[in-house]
Image (spheres, rainbow, N blue to C red):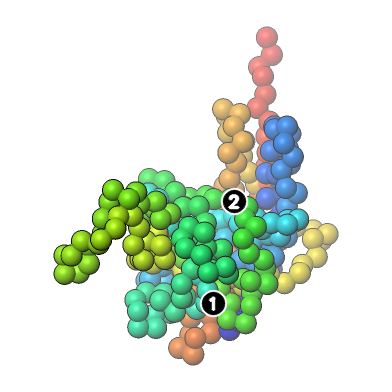
Amino acid sequence: MNQTAKAWTTAAVLAVGLAAATAFAQEQTATPAPEMTQPDAAVSLSGVDGQAYGIFTFTVYDYRIIVSGQVTGMPPGFHGLHIHTSGRCEDDGGGPFSAAGDHLNLMGLNHPDHAGDLPPLLVLQDGTAYLSVSTDRFTMDDLLDEDGSSLIVHERPDNFGNIPDRYFSFDEAGNRASEGGPDEETLATGDSGARIACGVIVEVPPMDMTGDMATPEMTMPADGSDNMMPTQPAEATAEVTPDGESTVEVTLDVTVEVTPETTPAS
């Protein structure tokens, strides 16, 4: 892989924050949630203009990988989210982030059955989004192979290849296809449109989780729901040099404080 992790000194704090949220979820539900540990890989997402949007982490748990991320400053609405085959985010002549290649597709299947196909990212009206999902479609070795991999956010929603046979596609000359249903582009991309953010997935070096670290701060909603999120966003930057080498620097300064809701004395 042609990339280096420049600074991961505070990335362990994220793992502590996830563990705190997991412990809370275990207390609130009958189904045990995964016990989170240090992330095994991470990615810093940047836009075409270099704007840092946020980070995603990849954590191995048993037979699956937990993919979690938080972004800010993105256009509201649903956005296609996919892992792509190459750990490069430059324009190689095919448009922004075209060097990332196609969707990670280990079994030669159509969309949405690619290994790298993930649920869509729903960005709120304030430009923020949070997503956490588990998948067993790939391993860390698949993500961190010789040419690496990248995470792409697309401009439009992902239709997951769901085009009923009553709909027909047309070519550039206006000729209607002889059969209805999804065409080749739909089966390859889900019609998610342009690539608006990209980041190279890099391995997180092992860290000592026993040292003194600040506790990530999370606030418990007054309504008693378990939708807890870090109160401070991560700061992440990514840079691609002319020779194609990418440098990722992540700074995460988060403190956690869970304050149970109290009942006034009668």
Query: Which is more toward the observer, 223 or 195?
Result: 195
> Residue 223 sits in which quadrant?
top right
Q: Amino acid at mark 2?
A: Val
Label 1: few (<14), some (14–19) or many (≥20) C-alpha neighbours in 10 Å = many
Q: Name the quarter where the N terminus is drawn.
A: bottom right
Q: CA distance from mark 1 to mark 2?
A: 21 Å
Q: Amino acid at mark 1?
A: Gly
Residue 69, percent across and down? 56, 56
Identity of the residue furthest to the left in this view: 174
Residue under numbered circle 1: 87
> Tag 2, which secondary structure?
strand
| Residue 256 versus residue 1 in the image, above or below | above
Q: Residue at x 70, y 32 (%)?
A: 28
Identity of the residue furthest to the top in this view: 266
Residue under numbered circle 2: 133
Q: Residue at x 49, y 90 (%)?
A: 243
Q: Residue at x 76, y 69 (%)?
A: 206
Answer whether residue 208 is visible to the viewer in this image. Answer: yes
Identity of the residue furthest to the bottom in this view: 243
- Check contact, mark 1 vs mark 2: CB within 8 A: no
Label 2: few (<14), some (14–19) or many (≥20) C-alpha neighbours in 10 Å = few
Which badge, 1 or 2, is on the more N-terminal residue? Answer: 1
Q: Residue at x 33, y 55 (%)?
A: 181
